[in-house]
Amino acid sequence: MDMLSSVPVRRFTWRTGQWHRPGLEYLVSTQRHHGFESHEEELLLLTADFTGILLEALAQPFRMCFDTAEGRVEHTPDFLLLMRGIPFLIDVRPAHRISFDDEVKFAASAEIALAMGWNYAVVTGWRDHVVGLVDSLSAGRREISDPLGLQPQLLAAAAEGPQPFGELVERCSLPAVGRAHAVHLLWHRRLGVEMSGPLRDSSMVRLSPARQLAVGRW
């Protein structure tokens, strides 16, 4: 590779009849919808939103043109995620679909990221329990009113130490409604949950260390 250049990609488009699964994903972090071209890309956006440090997500941020021994090659990375602290340039491709040509393009993307001082990653798949957990928590990502004051009750109960999710919600004045508020607090990281499996009543929940260190262990 003896020449490397890039130009901005001005648009994000799709059309009917294509094989991949396009759509728009709303991100709380940016308060906008962002385009994706596959279910794997949609999961990336959702997970990035859950991190709590996402500032901006740019789909297909630029097109690279570079020369290889086989000739001129073009590649458009899938996302540039501007995270608090450092940007992430990301390509998304299921592991079983990565070819040698893809590896060459990903290597070029990594060189661009290195030159710019960015992180770079290729997302090749997701663990099932992580997908299910983040998807469950995303139900509570939008702002909700709390006229019954259930969120302070949940936070006060969690401050006493780690406890199962089911027991925590039972300690507020209206447990059925408290579940929705508990999920909201988990999404916004005011509560923390172990991520070794899907969200269940037995999942251990604790107060976020950012608010107050809880006693005890998971």
Image (cartoon, grey):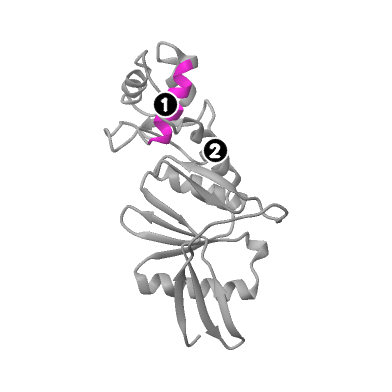
The residue shown at (57%, 83%) is 72
Q: Amino acid at mark 1?
A: Gln
Assess disc 2: are there few (<14), some (14-19) or many (≥20) residues with their C-alpha within 10 Å of its C-alpha.
Answer: some
Residue at the top extreme? 173
The residue shown at (31%, 26%) is 159
Magenta highlight range = 177-188
In this image, 129 relative to 121: left or right?
Answer: right
Helix, strand or loop: magenta stretch: helix
The residue shown at (39%, 44%) is 30
Task: Name which of mark 2 and mark 1 comes first in the sequence.
Answer: 2
Mark toward the viewer: 2 or 1: 2
Question: Can residue 218 be seen in the rendering of this structure?
Answer: no
Q: Position of residue 81 (x, y in %)?
A: 42, 56
Q: Which residue is mark 2?
A: 135
Q: Nearer the viewer, residue 125 or 10?
A: 10
Which quadrant is home to the C terminus?
Answer: top left
Label placed on residue 145: none
Q: Position of residue 44 (x, y in %)?
A: 52, 51
**Secondary structure at numbered mark 1:** strand
Q: Nearer the viewer, residue 8 or 113?
A: 8
Q: Position of residue 114 (x, y in %)?
A: 39, 72
Check if residue 187 falls in the magenta segment.
yes
Q: Which residue is mark 1?
A: 163
Using the image, determine if residue 10 lies above or below residue 206: below
Using the image, determine if residue 121 lies above or below residue 37: below
Using the image, determine if residue 164 lies above or below residue 192: above
